[in-house]
Amino acid sequence: MRNFREELGKKILILDGAMGTQLQEKGILKTGACPDYLNVTHPKDISDIHESYLDAGADIIVTNTFGANPIKLSEFELEDKVYEINFEAVKVAKSAVKDKGFVSLSIGPTGKFIEPVGDVSFDYIKEVFKKQVKPAIDAGVDLFSLETFMDIKELKAAIVAIRELTNKPIIAMMTFAEDGRTILGTSPEVFAKTIEVMEVDVIGANCSVGPDLLNEFVKRMADVTDKPLIIQPNAGIPRLVDGKTIFPVGPKEFVSYADDFLEYAAIVAGCCGTSPEHIKLLAKKLKGKPAKKRNIEKSTVLTSRTELVHIGYGNPVVFIGERLNPTGKKHLKEQLKEGKTGLYRKGAIEQVEHGAKALDVNVGVPMIDEPSMMKKCVLAVQSVVNVPLVVDSSNTEAIEEGLKAADGKVLINSVNGSSESMDTILPLAKKYGAAILALLLDETGIPNTAEERIAILDRIVKKAKELGIREEDIVADALALTVGSDKVRALESLRTIKLIKEKYSMTTILGLSNVSFGLPNRKLMNASYLSMAVYNGLDSAIVNPYDELLWQIKFASDLIVDRDKDASIYINNSSDITLQNKTQATKKEEIVESQFEKGSLEDRLFMCVVEGNEEEIVNFTKEALKKYEPLQISNNILIPALDIVGKLYDRGIYFLPQMIKSANAMKKAFNLLKEIIKKRAVKQKTGKTIVMATVKGDIHDIGKNIVSLLFETNGFEVVDLGKNVDDETIIKAIEKYNADAVGLSALMTTTMINMKNIIDKIKMKGLKVKIMVGGAAVTKEFAKKIGADIYAKDAIEAVRLVKQNV
């Protein structure tokens, strides 16, 4: 029998091509039918497709189960068939493959976003995936293919789900749009650095674009990770030709990229539009050739959903904001006891504006539900800033809730040298793909000498490596002790940093403010100790980012120890002692002009929309109603604020999660205003009406729902017909509501053609309505060919274009 892990990385493996287009060619995939259920009703046809790819040279055959999870199957009223469909799919594939290759279970996204972008929890989605995974294991599947994921948190949930059931190999892929980001703003580099540390065997990209663009995206992954890579492009971006959806890249053109793939790929495959002929030429060119090894420079990397931060290994010193910690902060303690997060959001924004590259989140207050509050605060902080997080707690349950809530790769603060700590915290880091802050103490306390502290680090490193945690994912805390009470041990901390670098070269960190505790002029003491620590090898520090002197010493120290190679960082900051993060904060400030007096009620309500503050917007709206009429609040405060959110999105400062949070906050305010209008019997202007629908045969509605939400919060009357909507229902709704516009969505290439059918019928009826189309596979060229009036690539553009044209 072949062994996947033994072959991986030694020679190029070939994974099969598209399933959907092959089902269409066979004529067994009917409009609106469930493709996954064909494993049960048409096993011979599915087996024939598998055999055609096997004969073409594929080493890995992927099951026909992309949507065979309970959520997707419920769209066809087949949620009770999850076990049967996945079990039979694996059995069908294994009967075709026999011992010639490997069978991989295809797992696609659920169509739900995890909170705070959506309304479902990490644990709920994890359990959904486990229901799909279990029958595949029972049927003898060899490995798992996680395909076409758009939300990195959902991908993490799928990985955790599999690992709670089995240690079989995992291929993890995301899909990227033409701009090189997922729909939620994740880049190839951020994806690679986030997922490489989880328990997966291969990472890469599939779908959305052709081999030209996907080649560039996976090359970017190859520049930052040594994890085996897979590339699985579409046969180009689909076009409409003579009423049929055509993928333009034929087998010969597809395989012309093979030499590029050979430079970095461990597995090569085809996605939408590819056929056995594509795979045959690909296998002929690449199969069995040696897979190339890559040497990547080490660094500790933390990520958010959209950003990554390199720490240590010669990089400039990184400051982590310390202010989201209730110790000594009465107002924070009070908010946590009340279950509120407003001050955490405010503190997060301000620290990032002052240059913090990551934020420490601590919610340790006695007599509160710390795990629940950690989750709530992590979600709140991520909704307003894009930097990575440090989950800081002595409560193991709170740490795990923080890990599940976090979008990216976080730093756990902390593990120490006691057996109890290592046995509980290190497995969590491995399970969720986190880095570890290692405190060099144990159950006996803080050692007096550097050598004793290094001995504790040795134990932590040994245990971590046994679990598969890499050295670069351990950040050693030499322990900054108070100079005022124990100068000798404080100096020993500096020597500890030096010894860590000599023995391990690993990343180091200090909680810097501890040094000056109980002393006058603490800023001077902190800055002085920082310079000495950097000289001895300090890489990062948890600090007060508002301390201007500390920043000046950091920039100077980085230059002196050659972490600022061309002095550009020092020069750029030498004349600016405010030290704000110009790259992001200043760009945002240029766009966010409230027009109201700072701190006024109007300004706070305005900023609730801009910052997506769902927690406080209702109270501020109620206060505003004491001064203004509902429509004045809507037109003069809320809608202008949402326009600002759109500009931030267009400039790449905000991404989809922030946009959704802002829209949801505004919706809460709008709902209150609507209730007041109804009670006062004031007739509200109806404005413009738009009918929204996902076309017949397509059960995907995430994008359409986001667009509907944005239209509603921009004052449109929205008639949302849902998904898989037949033509007659759409036409009747246009007529019934006298619609000004209709928005048609399709995610699948197989349902795009249905857009043309409904557009033709609308025009034959002579309905005077503007027609807008959009969706992952829809292009401007396609929209023009089918007679649409408007093509929008995203929700913000959809609202803007409809406003202009209706």
Image (cartoon, grey):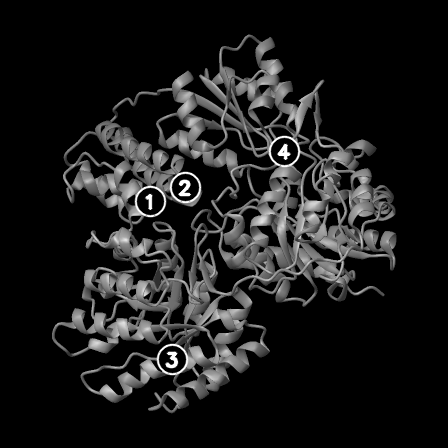
Image depth: mark 1 or mark 3 in front: 3
Q: Neighbour class for label 2 at 10 Å: few (<14), some, many (≥20)? A: many
Q: Amino acid at mark 1?
A: Gly
Mark 4 near mark 1, Cβ–Cβ under 8 Å? no
The disc, 4 or 1, on the residue closer to the chain's N-terminal end is: 1
Q: Secondary structure at mark 4?
A: loop
Q: Is residue 796 left or right of residue 237?
A: left
Q: Amino acid at mark 3?
A: Lys
Q: Badge 4 is on which residue?
A: 698
Q: Which mark is residue 498?
A: 3
Q: Badge 1 is on which residue?
A: 612
Image depth: mark 3 or mark 2 in front: 3
Tell me which residue sits at (35%, 51%) in the image. Answer: 385
Mark 1 near mark 2, Cβ–Cβ under 8 Å? yes
Q: Badge 2 is on which residue?
A: 660
Image depth: mark 2 or mark 4 in front: 2
Q: Position of residue 50 (x, y in %)?
A: 83, 46
